[in-house]
């Protein structure tokens, strides 16, 4: 049985705060039921992305972002608005080939969009080479995991 | 902008990619191509410094992070080099599993490149998405095959992205026979799909073009296998060397216009690595169905048209499916997942054939088992000079084209080499400045 919810963390833990999504996934794991929620860590390659949510009705995409907001803060972005903020492959930490909005558009063309896609951006500050999150982002990831667990519980109760 | 074809300057904006920043500048003066500079900034340099002081066991996992598309290549070259330094030889069944893992990566990487990066160029679409809207069957077939590649990497490597099951000496764990039997079943269907993809790709209109005269083709060569895991390096210029001799014949040099190093044959002249070179030097070692298909499609070892690289990639995908199927069908759970490894001081080199071409690693390990020095030569840096010279040649023959057509063929030509910058598909925000 395929879990109805898939949470996909995108990023590269070897680029400091670009590892935010992986950190959120690690923290989210103990808070959710694996039969209900599938956790996937990806690098942003769009085909893997759209194939990783196959069978789920609800999808969360988690990624580090740099928008000038407070480091470690997190905010939800509508999948419909991705194109406005997406930089088509020059995403923080390096996306391969296409941006998130392209992945969503490819899924739409191939009729494999889930019922809902929600995007959670974690504001990063340090994207240099190396491992380890900055202190503010580390704290933000812990809060984001709790937020996500609550949102997923609401979703599953419907 | 003007339309004076005698003086033109193409400037491609800098790019940020997983493997660096790239850009393209083309200058045309007095109706002739004066210069072409392909600029790439390559993070592997950072990884080399990053590796120093790490345990000998870490490079397979760390270097896998260099590229999201070909992590297995980095893992395999790292393992080979470090195992050589430590005097370790893996059991034959474990080598088979590594070969299978590498097949998965070739399938995944080649299929992605063919369908979403390169095919749109040939069929006249601005992007893979636009092509998918009108060629949905072909794109879905391709992406299904790519998924099979992912599946192989997942089964053997532990997960599809940046596999975690590879270790010095072998693997942390090995698949069950039931898992492998299921994989074999998928591969039978995958092999048929791969064959149809090759036939489809061979119908694409191909620009009439050849590599610049004198370009040496360089590839690994194995006595019995189409090369993924080695073992000697050969060239169309007669080179035949072992891995320890690589740095006696090849070097990386700094060039003014790029922070990336350029590969260079010390004997002089450009050289090419990757599918076209592999095929030219190893066509006789293709698996039977791939070999038959290459013959059917008129592909011979004399092929020198870089645009036909897409056909070679499709043939190599068939080959990878065949080899993977063969390994999966005869699979028995190995008696051990890894051979014992003990740290010792040593120097070791390793090389394998990444989807894009030769990937060389060299490590110095100290008596405590820590990396004292690391050297990584990726295929993209090796191909940079030949890409530039090929573009000079191509543009020189194409100056009669208008800006849009010239831009298109430049992009397509860069993607013939599948450099990491081309993973940005249709990235070339090409501007033509005329004087």
Image: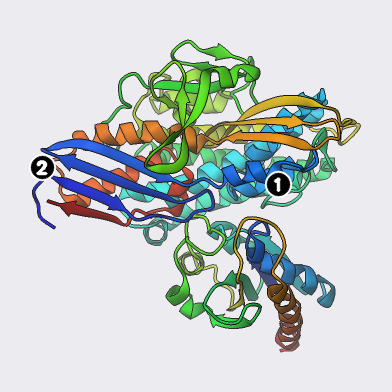
Q: Is residue B371 visible?
A: yes
Rendered position, B168 above or below B250: below
Q: Residue at x 41, y 56 (%)?
A: B128
Counting from the top left corner in percent of width and height, residue B155 is at 75, 46
Q: Which mark is residue B6?
A: 2
Q: Is residue A54 visible?
A: no
Q: How many marks?
A: 2
To which quarter of the image does residue A133 belong? bottom right
Marks 1 & 2 on one chain: yes
Counting from the top left corner in percent of width and height, residue B381 is at 48, 36
As rendered, which of B118 and A77 lies closer to the eye?
Answer: A77
Q: Which mark is residue B62?
A: 1
To which quarter of the image does residue B27 belong? top left
Counting from the top left corner in percent of width and height, residue B37 is at 33, 41
Rendered position, B10 above or below A151: above
Chain identity of mark 1: B
Classify mark 1: helix, strand or loop: helix
Q: Earlier in the sequence, mark 1 or mark 2?
A: 2
Q: Residue at x 47, y 10 (%)?
A: B238
Q: How busy is the neighbourhood of tag 1: few (under 14 within 10 Å), some, or many (20 plus)? A: some
Chain identity of mark 2: B
Q: Residue at x 68, y 49 (%)?
A: B151
Counting from the top left corner in percent of width and height, residue B31 is at 12, 38
As rendered, which of B163 and B433 lies closer to the eye?
Answer: B433
Rendered position, A37 above or below B275: below
Q: Which mark is residue B27?
A: none
Classify mark 2: helix, strand or loop: loop
């Amino acid at each position: 049985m395929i879990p109805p919810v898939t949470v996909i963390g995108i990023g590269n833990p070897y680029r400091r705060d670009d590892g935010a999504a992986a950190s959120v996934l690690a923290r989210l794991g103990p808070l959710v039921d694996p039969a209900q929620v599938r956790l996937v860590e990806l690098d942003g390659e769009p085909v893997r992305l759209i194939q990783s949510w196959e069978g789920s009705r609800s999808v969360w995409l988690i990624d580090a972002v740099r928008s000038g907001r407070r480091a470690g803060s997190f905010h939800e972005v509508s999948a419909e608005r991705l194109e406005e903020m997406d930089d088509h492959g020059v995403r923080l930490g390096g996306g391969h080939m296409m941006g998130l909005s392209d992945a969503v558009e490819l899924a739409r063309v191939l009729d494999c969009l889930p019922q809902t896609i929600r995007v959670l951006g974690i504001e990063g500050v340090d994207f240099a080479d190396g491992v380890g999150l900055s202190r503010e982002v580390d704290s933000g990831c812990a809060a984001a995991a709790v937020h996500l667990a609550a949102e997923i519980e609401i979703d599953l109760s419907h | 902008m003007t339309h004076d074809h005698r003086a033109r300057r193409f400037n491609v904006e800098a790019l940020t990619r997983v493997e660096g920043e790239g850009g393209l500048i083309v200058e045309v003066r007095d109706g002739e191509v004066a210069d072409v500079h392909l600029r790439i900034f390559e993070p592997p340099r950072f990884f080399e410094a990053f590796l120093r002081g790490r345990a000998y066991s870490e490079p397979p996992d760390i270097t896998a992070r260099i590229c999201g598309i070909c992590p297995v290549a980095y893992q395999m070259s790292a393992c080979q080099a470090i195992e050589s330094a430590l005097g370790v030889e893996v059991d034959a069944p474990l080598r088979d599993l590594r070969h299978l893992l590498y097949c998965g990566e070739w399938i995944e990487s080649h299929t992605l490149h063919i369908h979403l990066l390169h095919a749109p160029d040939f069929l006249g679409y601005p992007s893979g998405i636009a092509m998918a809207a009108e060629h949905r069957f072909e794109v879905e077939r391709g992406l299904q095959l790519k998924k099979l590649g992912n599946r192989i990497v997942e089964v053997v490597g532990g997960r599809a992205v940046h596999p975690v099951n590879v270790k010095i000496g072998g693997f942390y764990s090995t698949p069950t026979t039931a898992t492998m039997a299921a994989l074999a079943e998928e591969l039978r269907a995958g092999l048929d799909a791969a064959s149809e993809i090759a036939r489809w790709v061979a119908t694409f209109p191909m620009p009439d073009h050849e590599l610049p005269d004198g370009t040496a083709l360089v590839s690994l060569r194995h006595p019995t296998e189409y090369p993924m895991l080695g073992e000697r390096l050969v060239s169309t210029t007669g080179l035949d060397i072992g891995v320890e001799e690589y740095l006696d014949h090849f070097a990386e040099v700094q060039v003014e216009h790029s922070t990336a190093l350029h590969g260079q044959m010390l004997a002089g002249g450009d050289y090419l690595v990757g599918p076209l070179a592999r095929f030219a030097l190893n066509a006789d070692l293709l698996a039977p169905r791939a070999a038959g298909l290459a013959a059917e499609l008129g592909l011979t070892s004399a092929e020198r048209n870089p645009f036909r690289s897409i056909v070679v990639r499709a043939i190599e995908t068939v080959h990878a499916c065949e080899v993977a199927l063969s390994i999966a069908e005869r699979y028995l759970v190995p008696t051990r997942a890894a051979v014992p490894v003990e740290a010792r001081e040593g120097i070791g080199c390793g090389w394998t054939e990444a989807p894009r071409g030769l990937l060389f690693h060299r490590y110095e390990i100290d008596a405590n088992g820590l990396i004292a020095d690391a050297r990584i030569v990726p295929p993209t840096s090796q191909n940079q000079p030949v890409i530039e010279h090929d573009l000079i040649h191509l543009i020189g023959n194409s100056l009669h084209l208008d800006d849009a057509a010239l831009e298109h063929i430049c992009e397509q030509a860069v993607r013939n080499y599948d450099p990491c910058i081309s993973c940005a598909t249709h990235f070339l925000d090409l501007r033509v400045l005329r004087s």
